[in-house]
């Protein structure tokens, strides 16, 4: 009888332990992290996944961060913000340029000649958010801000200066670039990445404004013969979480998310894009097919002064534009 009772106690303990483990596992909060780009893209592999791993290392018992890459939870880049607001995606990588009108101050990062590196653009973006100068985040919590390296001009036919762009058809990356290109006498063309490649292939455009990583990602490099390196603005990225999801997390989890996000993500994200951009430029130089031209600092300053009207127009046409612009310049002075 005693042995039977002992056996029953052991069995009861085993069942209790199993129940406890299952309950602990089921209590783990699932956080769905989604992007419209593939897992191998630099934003995912070099920024978002390291952030996920760091948070999991801190609070893996409380939450499970699971990646859904390549548009698994929504393919359209234009819908990522909406999908996050609605809770279809808990955390998403949002490109402000694909969400027209939602983030008015983000046009700052498209201004030609303002930012020299991805790192400084990334840090400026995060600090502007900390100061409450960036708007449009209804229904979401901002985890991080980072930016790509400054765009360059990639040409089918070679140019010696920006003055040579007169009458040429150049793919622009938005309205700000279009205004600047018009001032140079060029004819800006608004094209998607797919359309851009087709137009270059057919010779219906002469060049494109694009980042080095973008040129590789979209396999555009074989279609051009020259890279004219002037800093024609950058592309900002946001890592956003559904606000309701954020509010439901423990303070411990929230603290971990922001410790590895925020300024830390701005620095590491900017550095990741800079590092990859350098590698791409090194590869292009080694291949020797594409001519790489970088004007001297005096010439770049001359171009920057001529483009100041684009900055002035943006300030004038953006609510609170002057405050945002002045704050950005102050942060940049501290970084340089």
Image (tube, rainbow, N blue to C red):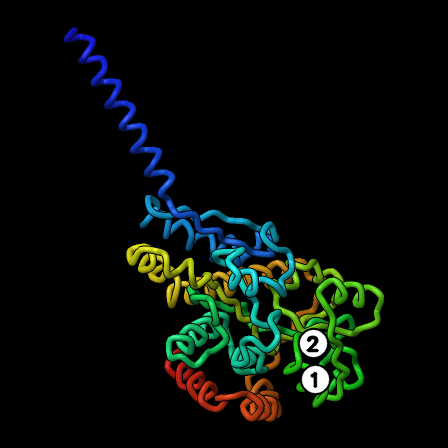
Are circles 2 and 1 on residues that touch, CB within 8 Å? yes
Sequence-wise first label, 2 or 1: 2
Left or right for 304, reference 258: right
- Mark 1: few, some, or many residues within 10 Å (few <14, many ≥20)? many
Q: Which residue in the structure is indicated by mark 1?
A: 181
Left or right for 192, reference 265: right
Give the secondary structure at mark 2: strand
Q: Is residue 231 visible?
A: no
Residue 198, picture quadrant? bottom right
Q: Is residue 311 visible?
A: yes
Q: Residue at x 33, y 37 (%)?
A: 23
- Mark 2: few, some, or many residues within 10 Å (few <14, many ≥20)? many
Residue 226 location (% of width, % of height): 71, 70
Residue 96, picture quadrant? bottom right
Give the secondary structure at mark 1: helix
Q: Residue at x 71, y 64 (%)?
A: 193
């Amino acid at each position: 009888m005693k042995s039977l009772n002992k056996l029953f106690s052991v069995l009861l303990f085993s069942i209790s332990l199993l129940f406890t483990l299952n309950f602990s596992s089921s209590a783990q909060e699932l956080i769905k992290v989604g992007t419209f780009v593939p897992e191998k893209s630099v934003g995912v592999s070099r920024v978002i996944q390291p952030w996920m791993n760091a948070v999991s290392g801190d609070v893996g018992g409380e939450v499970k961060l699971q990646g859904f890459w390549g548009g698994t939870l929504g393919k359209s880049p234009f819908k990522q913000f909406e999908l996050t607001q609605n809770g279809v995606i808990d955390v998403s990588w949002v490109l402000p340029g694909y969400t027209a009108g939602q983030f008015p101050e983000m046009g700052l990062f498209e201004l030609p000649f303002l930012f020299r590196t991805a790192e400084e653009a990334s840090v400026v973006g995060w600090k502007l958010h900390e100061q409450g100068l960036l708007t449009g985040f209804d229904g979401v919590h901002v985890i991080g801000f980072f930016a790509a390296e400054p765009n360059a001009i990639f040409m089918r036919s070679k140019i010696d200066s920006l003055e040579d762009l007169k009458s040429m058809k150049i793919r622009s990356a938005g309205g700000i670039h279009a205004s600047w290109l018009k001032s140079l006498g060029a004819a800006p063309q608004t094209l998607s990445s797919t359309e851009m490649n087709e137009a270059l292939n057919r010779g219906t455009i002469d060049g494109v404004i694009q980042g080095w990583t973008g040129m590789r990602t979209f396999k555009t490099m074989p279609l051009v013969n020259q890279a004219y390196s002037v800093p024609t603005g950058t592309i900002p990225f946001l890592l956003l979480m559904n606000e309701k999801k954020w509010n439901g997390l423990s303070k411990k989890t929230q603290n971990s998310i922001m410790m590895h996000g925020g300024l830390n993500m701005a620095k590491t994200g900017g550095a990741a894009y800079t590092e990859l951009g350098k590698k791409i430029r090194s590869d292009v130089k080694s291949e020797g097919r594409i001519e790489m031209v970088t004007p001297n600092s005096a010439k770049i300053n001359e171009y920057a002064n001529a483009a100041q009207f684009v900055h002035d127009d943006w300030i004038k046409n953006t609510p609170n534009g002057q405050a945002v612009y002045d704050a950005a310049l102050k942060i940049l002075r501290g970084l340089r």
